[in-house]
Image (cartoon, rainbow, N blue to C red):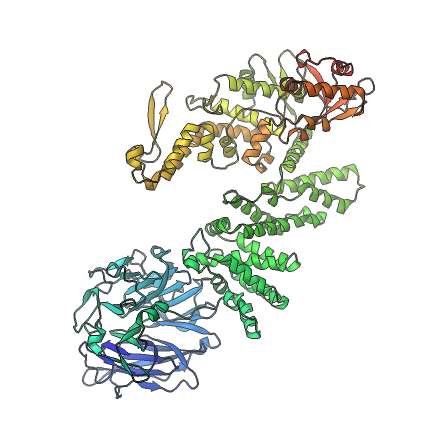
Amino acid sequence: MLCWGELTSGSGQNPCSQSEEILTGERVQHVCSREGVTVFVLENGKVYTRARGQDQKSKPGQFTKFKDQKIHFADSGTSHILFLSKGGSLFQSKVKSWKTAAQTRTFSIMKPQLLKDLNGRKIIQVACGNNHSLALTKDGQLFTWGQNTYGQLGLGTKDACRHIPELMISLPGMPVAQITAGGEHSFALSLSGTVFGWGRNNHGQLGLKDTEDRYIPNHVKLLELKRIIYSSCGEEHTAVLTKDGLVFTFGAGSFGQLGHNSTEDETKPHLLGYLFGKKVSQIACGSFHTLAFVPSIGKIFSFGRGEKGQLGNRETKDQLLPLPVNITGMSGKCTTADGHTTEPVIKRIFAGGNQSFAVCNDEVDLVSKMDRSSHITLKRIITVDNFLEKQLCKERRKAISEAFSCSQTLSGSFLEVRNDGHFKTNGEMSGLDLSAVSRGFENLAKSCSLLQKVKNAVQHHLIPSLLRSPTCVETLRVYIIIPELIAVLGESRDSAMLLESLSRAILSLEEEYFKILECWWRTIPDDFFMRLVTMYQRESNQFHLLALAEVSRYDTRLHDSLKILQALFKVNLSRYAKIPDGNFCIPVMENLRYSFMSVTGYACSELKFQQYFSALLGIQRQLFAYPCIFDMETKLQALNLEFMLLANSKELIHLQVSRKAILQSALKGLKSIRSAAYCAVLQVVFEGESCYGKGVTQEFFTLLSRELYGSRGIFQRSEESGLLWFSNEEPEMDLAFHVMGILCGFAVSNSLICNFNFPLALYKKLLHVPPSLEDLKELSPTEGNSLQEVLDYEHDDIEEMLCLDFTVSEETTEGSRVRQELIPDGINTPVQKHNRKQYVDAYVDYKLNISVKKHFEAFSQGFRKSALPVVDIFFPEELRNVLQGNTGYEWGQLEQNARYAGYTQTDKTVRNFWKVFEQLPKEKKLQFLAFLSGSERIPVGGFQNFCITILNTKKETPDSSYPRAYTCSRILDLPNYSCIEILAEKLLHAMEYGEEFNAQEL
């Protein structure tokens, strides 16, 4: 082993920069040094020390006071030394110093004492600052003690001193890989390369772009995704090493210790460019100098303060750039453990206060050996996956149970190590190897007793320890891992209890972290996502087993499950491979009926049924917040139930319109009730006609749609797509748009078809879903496709080729064109490769939101005033289908759904009717459909939700209980909202004798 710089033997005179060879023949594992004291830890567990001024031989003295303990690691501060045994026990020695008569400083090391405050905790790492200490336990807990003048203990305060170790709670759940300490600052590094610093920051040694001290760990965001594997701290500077062999330095640079050919401080991590391409494998910081080792050439590079010869360049000058240390020139040959002499081959490097050390390797094959062990290895926290891959002995079972009790351990397990995937952990990727998670839990499930212990550990220890606002994003990995434990537990009471606890923890996360979890759900493999959805769908479906009293109560467990199921549904919408929507649905109506029958039985009074009906309707409304659980049929049932309840409690709104001016007379009639707040039943009557009812109201909407589409009215029709949109040429049309919104709301609530030919963007906006580029493509294909071409343009000359800026050209009412800026100073902001998505997003936002904001808000307010609240459970595509109907004419389904009164299906009249109807051309069938319902379009769901009843008026006479409706001035009967009675005797007579049918004559 070689040492150069300020040596600690002899009288304490500052030596020249010559190196000395020490501990010849010994295998050194670790070295630490501060002013006046050096500690050497050997591979066999022995410890040697050197203290300046002591009467010692040239060889360091052996510490013999650890009894049977073998020491694994040591670190020293200015007044203390920590010794870590291989068994995890921690010892502390005080260092005393005094001045002799000759004014030289003399040091002595006191007897090591077991640190009883940490006794029983298995310590795996320690770090010493000048006067403070850090200790990391095997289960990932971090303890600090000592001076706290600058917040270097990370306890959230600054104060004089903490005499006993305190648990640092400001890094909860983070899987710590390494801790290190400088003069008065500290660092912690996670397993996936996340760096946190705290303490003194007067020179920017925390890398946070400023010089303010920090009292709790702060994420060094500028090092994010840099794949950091090691950090080292000097007195007032810091260096970090990436897995790619790059070095970043920051902090004080007064002696050149940052290696940037400057004495300036750096408050931000700065890449050490002078070593770029050399692939550094080890770094070490002394007080004011830095070492870096490049194994491929076997060279140590040094830079910084050289006053004591610590740079190994045979001089005492400072060095601003990394230059190689001439080990051969200083020492000649190295002597190995078996007495042979070889060329010095560097195995490890260390830096003390004003000293440097190199442990020589006795291997001859330099390149192959150093490549296999090029990166620094540290003792890490225990991980679950390491244990699960091995045979489960008694000790290992206990360790597994303990590992599942803390999030530090679990969040550091099952990492994606292939291609260093876990180093990519961020707000979009978890860094987990989910196939390893599956294998681990498959092994775990082989032992029922161990599985139960793990479940108890997770439920009673792990989950209660999770915080609303984790410091480190890696902590969120536990939310991905725990569902796999629930999956292997199966459909049991244990799994239900664990899922309930997990749900509460997920929903308690602050919004920022909940969104990160949603992003991780979006990228997990399909089978994992499907399993998660099934888990919550099954849990949500359990509420039908509750008694009536329980159902009517706001059940927290149910709603927690539904909230997460709804969140998963939203995530599914943007997954690359979506799972079918039906996987989120639960049989709501069947569950409610089951609850009713289980409590009341089949026999109950009408009054009780009405009361229970109202209660169920109230429960159903609570569930409207989770539209993913309703299939389309259930949503339509809910809409109809709401309307039926409304029809019994609200008065009709009568609207009289003129057939000659449908639009204008409707606007005039509804203006008078604009200020009223209502969700009402609409009844339309045409001027000069006495007929009324649903058929007439439907006919009104059919005629209104034609007039609105066929003439230049308040909406603007796209010549390309034929769709209607808000016109920005008419600034004073708010009242008209408000009334049109009211009419659309009436149509939805009254289950009427209103084919206004709006784009999907309108329905998205009504349901608070942001429209996208795809919606602009639908409304204006040429415009939308042009924007897509901008997005798809991958070349760097986009500015020269497309000549675009952040403006949009609009035509005014006078026919001229003006340019609207999409962002501040948009006219002077060219569209380039890096900002093209920003341009497209801003363009779409302007076209579909900003330019029509005033008109849409008027329309939306009107719609919300007349539409039932239940519309919020529909998705935009569904709401469009409900309002506009569809044209999926399956005429055979119409015959299958037909009902008869006074006839049977085999009667000749009925057979003739369907025979003639089948032979009619489509145009005639549509005319007949319009005669029946008032519209040529059919309700969403097709003829399955549309049936007719043919009534023989010679045998059956409708009584007053039949609701009445009229269409085309012809009387029709509606037994209920989905069934139409035909009382057209003339038509039936024609069918009986096989006469030709002409719908126009009717």
Q: Residue at x 57, y 32 (%)?
A: 879
Q: Give the side of residue 794 with respect to residue 653, left or right.
A: left
Q: Is residue 542 above or below residue 983?
A: below
State which quarter of the image contains the C terminus. top right
Q: Nearer the viewer, residue 188 or 371?
A: 371
Nearest the camera: 842 or 913? 913
Residue 463 locus on image (x, y percent) = 54, 60
Q: Write down the quadrant of residue 150 in the picture.
A: bottom left
Quadrant position of residue 6 = bottom left
State how many labels appear: 0
Left or right placement of residue 740 versus residue 696 in this view = left
Reply above or below: 566 against 748. Answer: below
Q: In which quadrant of the rendered view does residue 51 lie?
A: bottom left
Residue 965 seen by the camera: no
| Residue 737 x/y as whole percent | 50, 24
> On the rendered structure, is 287 left or right of 189?
left
Question: In the picture provided, is 903 more to the left or to the right than 343?
Answer: right
Image point 70% across, 19% down: which residue? Answer: 917
Image quarter hosting the N terminus: bottom left
* In-front residue for pair 649/581: 581
* Spot occupied by residue 651 in the image (x, y as percentages of width and height): 66, 26
Residue 876 in sight from this viewpoint: yes
- Where 87 sits versus 367, above or below? below
- Where residue 875 sits: x, y (%)? 56, 36
